[in-house]
Amino acid sequence: MEKIIVFGNSVFAEHIYFLLTHDSPYHVTAFTVDHKYIKEDQLLGLPVVPFETVESLFPPSEYKMTLPISFQKINRLREEKYFQAKTKGYQLINYISSSATSFPGLAMGDNCMILENCTIGPLVQIGYDVIIASGAIIGHHAVLKDHCFISPGAVILGGVTVEEYCFIGANATIKEEVVVAKECLIGSGVSITRNTVERGVYINPPADLYPKRSDELRTWLMWPVRSRKS
């Protein structure tokens, strides 16, 4: 089995460790993170070593790396560590869950992750350093450019282009042929039906707190589209 170093000591790093351990040909050997962020010298029974000197302990001639860093700084932090790891000489792996659906000819750069129950349609192009989280749907002919993060349950329909550094929130929907401009933040549950502007932030208003408690509601109040007589 190929030996892997996982960047990070967060719950997301633990999540990726679990997936790689139980659903990949890779063997996770250690975690690495910037020295100032090391809380404990072990995680899940494996060593946590400073990223600044990781190559002296786990040389890139023998180990590969993955960087499951989320969307801090609109994915710029993951991009920064991506290039630092490559400068150190590490080969960055891809992970595609065995429960994901994809088709032959999928074009994808390195340090990409397609997590469980995703559907990736035919003729999709995925750039470098892209994370597609659980249950997302990427329609045919979609293009996801470098350093993007697609959250769980997001739906990106056919022919959509998502430019670099974008964050697509959970259960967001992007209409066919739309272009999501560079560095956009699309919030959870948002529906995008037209091209966005660069660095745009698109969010839905938060849900209102109803003035009555749940045990005070009649059934019809829970489904406002129904009439009171139904």
Image (spheres, helix red, strand yellow):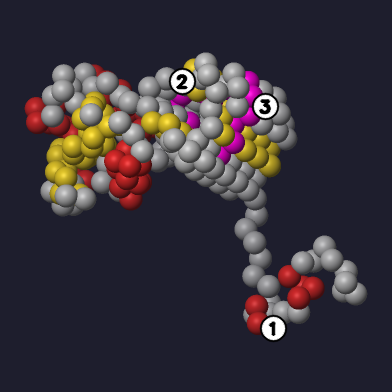
190 vs 86, left or right, is right
Place of residue 194 in the rendered image (x, y in percent of width and height, measured from the top left): 72, 31
Tag 3: amino acid? Gly
Quadrant location, the C terminus: bottom right
- In the foreground, 9 or 211: 9
Residue 7 visible, this angle: yes
- In the foreground, 168 or 196: 168
The residue lying at 23 percent from left, 35 percent from top is 27
Residue 178 visible, this angle: no
Residue extending furthest toward the bottom: 216
Q: Which mark is residue 108?
A: 2
Q: CA distance from mark 3 to mark 2?
A: 17 Å
Extent of the magenta region = 136-148
Q: Work out whether 165 lies above or below 71.
A: above
- In the foreground, 116 or 214: 116
Q: Which residue is mark 1?
A: 216
The disc, 1 or 2, on the residue closer to the chain's N-terminal end is 2
8 vs 103, left or right, is left
* SS under mark 3: loop
Q: Which residue is mark 3?
A: 158
* Residue 47 is one of the magenta-drawn residues: no
Tag 2: amino acid? Met
Tag 1: amino acid? Glu
The residue lying at 26 percent from left, 46 percent from top is 9
